[in-house]
Amino acid sequence: MSGSGASDSYVAVIEKSPRSHGHRGRRGRAGKGGVCEQPPVGASLSKVAQGAFYGVSVARYQGERELIREAKRIAAYRASVAAENARDTAIRQANAQIVAAEAARVAEREAHKSLFDRALGAVSVGVDHASAVVSNAWDRGSTWVQYEAQVAWRRARDPLQALRDDSSLTSIAENATGSFQILAGAAELYNEGKYCGDAGECLIGDGVFQPHDSDGGPMAITIGHTVTFGEITRPSKGLVEHEFTHVLQYEIAGALPFAIDYGIEQVWGVVVQHETKEDAYWNQSTERWARYVQEDADIEPGKNPLGHWFETSGS
């Protein structure tokens, strides 16, 4: 019941009283004689106060319910926001895990690719190295075969000289020198000019041993019919004739007698003549003959201006 309801009841009681209809008599409730007795004023005010209190209570109750509903709406909203944030956080975490997994896969692929590249590089280097080794071996082998073919053709054209070379160990010495220079030192054949490739075999380039003079300059060395020019890749005509003079000396004496005479003259010049090693070398009869041929264009390796090549005197 509201406050307005209590007032209406009170008005209804007043209207039913005798005073309201023009009757005289004492106000109060109806007694035994049918006289209406008027209710006390305090009772009526108490009912009004009760109605007003009830109305205020109802209003407070309704206000509190509204506050509760508003609080529930706020709590529901906050819960919804929290749930949305939780979903966003879960999504971000899931995305981060996906990104991390993809990064791990990419890193793994890169690692595999790097490993494959290194393996491929190692294989490529190995193939290149093997190819270089095979190519180098092929070059040396083909050069050596060509060298042996030239030696065989030269010996076939002069079988008597070949027999002399074999008996004096010249063939063994020259063939060992040429084979060693080609196979172990990668020397190349030089077949230009009148003598190289015909009267003997000439080698240039990176041999195992490179002859040098006392000043460190390059020079040539001859063993039998094999002439090694070494670093001198374009030997002069005079130098070629100088070396092929030694080839003729090997043919005349043979490798062993040539080496013995060479050593005797070197020791003689140093010990007996008190010459320097270089002077004793240049004063040997073999070198004097070869030097004359080199310095005089009219003298060929087959002509000896000193007479017998064993002689140490003469001009």
Image (spheres, rainbow, N blue to C red):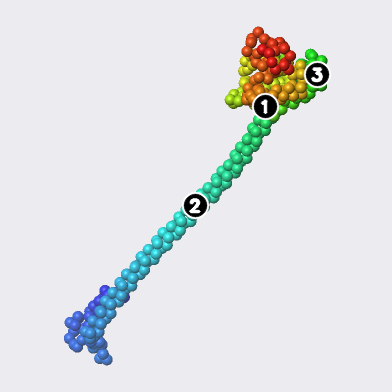
The three-letter amino acid code for the residue at tag 1 is: Val
Relative to the observer, which residue lies in front, 201 or 13?
Answer: 201
Q: Which residue is mark 2?
A: 96
From this view, report whether residue 118 is shown above or below residue 290.
Answer: below
Q: Can residue 189 be seen here?
A: no
Q: CA distance from mark 1 to mark 3?
A: 33 Å
Residue at screen point 37% across, 66% down: 71
Name the image quarter holding the C terminus.
Answer: top right
Q: Earlier in the sequence, mark 2 or mark 1?
A: 2
From this view, report whether residue 18 is shown above or below residue 204.
Answer: below
Q: Can residue 313 be seen here?
A: yes
From this view, report whether residue 80 is shown above or below residue 23.
Answer: above
The three-letter amino acid code for the residue at tag 2 is: Ala
Element type at mark 3 = helix
How packed mark 2 is, by other alpha carbons closer than 10 Å (few <14, some 14-19, many 20 or more), is: few
How packed mark 3 is, by other alpha carbons closer than 10 Å (few <14, some 14-19, many 20 or more), is: some
Residue 121 numbered tag: none
> Which image quadrant for residue 175?
top right
Which callout, 3 or 2, points to the residue nearer the camera? 3
> Which image quadrant for residue 53?
bottom left
Element type at mark 2 = helix
Q: Which residue is mark 1?
A: 271
| Residue 283, image x, y percentages | 66, 19
| Residue 222, image x, y percentages | 70, 21
| Residue 295, image x, y percentages | 63, 13
Q: Which residue is mark 3?
A: 164
